[in-house]
Image (cartoon, rainbow, N blue to C red):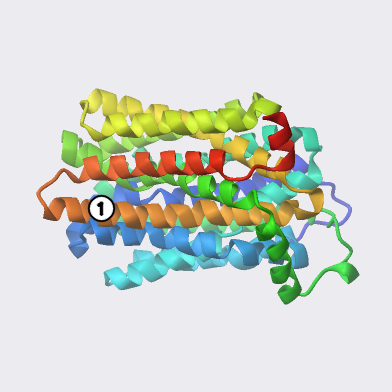
Amino acid sequence: MTTSPSRQVPPWLMLLALIGAFALSQAFRTIAAILATPLQAEFGLSPQALGVFAGAFHFAFGALQLLMGISIDLQGVRRTVLMAFPLAIVGALLSALAPSFGVLVVGQVLIGVGCAPAFLVCTVFIARQFPPERFAAVSGLTLGVGSLGMLLTGTPLAWLVQATSWRTGFLALAVGSALAWALILWLVREPPAPVAASERPSVLGALRSYGALFALPHTLGILALAAVTYASFISLRGLWLGPLLIERHGFSLVQSGNVAIAVSVVGMFGPILFGRFDPGAARRRWIVGFTFAVAAIFAVMAFNPGAALDVAGAIAGGLLSGYIVLQYADVKAAYPPAMTGRAMAVFTMAMFLGVAVMQWLTGAVASAASAHGADPFVSVLLTIAGLLVAGALAFVWLPKPASAAKAG
């Protein structure tokens, strides 16, 4: 199923094939919101254990970003995703057959490793195949189209799980992942590498090269904010949205799935919208302002303003989450071209390790609140709001890139 050398595949078609794997990774990372209740019923999970289940994917995903970045440099986009993604299929099958919670977590880890290059290969492909001035717009479109995967973990998955079982949900995603892998094998051709094969560093040399990036003073502020922005959206959409609507407001599984669909739909258009209206020099002020706005939404939702406002807040947060595409543009502008790939890998690592930590932390907070007779959702949502504020302040107060310092 290899592409004929004489066959010219348009870059946008190859990108769509890569987005297929990214969409499946989006589905895997948000599956906990729908499966939380049936998993708690079958395995007797505490909120903290539920956080471990949801966070396992993101920890594995985030921890592998640096190695995936090196693999893309050494092996290329196509080989990297074709070698890694089958682990997601194996992990989904293992999860579907899991006899215990421990095996289920192992399945999540395998899925996280398999999906680790899914978005990174898209960003590198865009950087190599599309004009620099279109980077934010095409990246925003990629995030938006890739969010179709979250639609699968809304009403369709809720209906399937309610009609059959949570195990069928994993089986369905395993089949979809196999089809996505086959599409990449068929369509994707290797984009030209910026460095000749004879000049590429060894794996150890590539790992050491990350030191130069971490030595730059503005990296810390970028990573501090990266660790909380996407994490806040995924922690709500991918873990707490279903339990909140079901336990706080008495929604059914399918009704909560309908809300998840609505959040996912607006979440698709957010990156496209923000990608088209990149403010350039004012980008960092926009990023900080929208981070505070999302924190305010979580703070309002914490105090149970009613089912309608909780749903409206989740939908508004889904739309505003699109500003995360501006962070990718900020990272690209903050480092010299020779560092772009490594910077994207480190940024993506921070994002997904942040998701893992936030989901674990909010699970622990919810368990502690329940043990003391408090509303766990108040504690969870206020914790997320506080982390967003802390990340934004770090982004503002820590050193800025030279270009941003001059603009500011």
Above or below, 38 relative to 71: above
x and y, in percent, of residue 180 in the image: 58, 53
Residue in the image at 35% along x and 38% along y: 155
Would residue 52 be found to the left or right of residue 322 on screen?
A: left
Residue in the image at 36% along x and 53% along y: 359
In front of the other: 76 or 201 = 201
x and y, in percent, of residue 1 in the image: 72, 61
| Residue located beneath label 1 in the image | 365
Residue 399 visible in the picture: yes
Would residue 57 be found to the left or right of residue 22 on screen?
A: left
Above or below, 80 relative to 399: below
Disc 1 residue type? Answer: Val
- Image quadrant containing the C terminus: top right
x and y, in percent, of residue 271 in the image: 57, 33
What is the secondary structure assignment of the residue under circle 1?
helix
Task: Name the image quarter holding residue 405.
Answer: top right
Q: Residues within 10 Å of mark 1 (few under 14, many from 20)?
A: many
Would residue 300 be found to the left or right of residue 88 on screen?
A: left
Residue in the image at 20% along x and 40% along y: 246
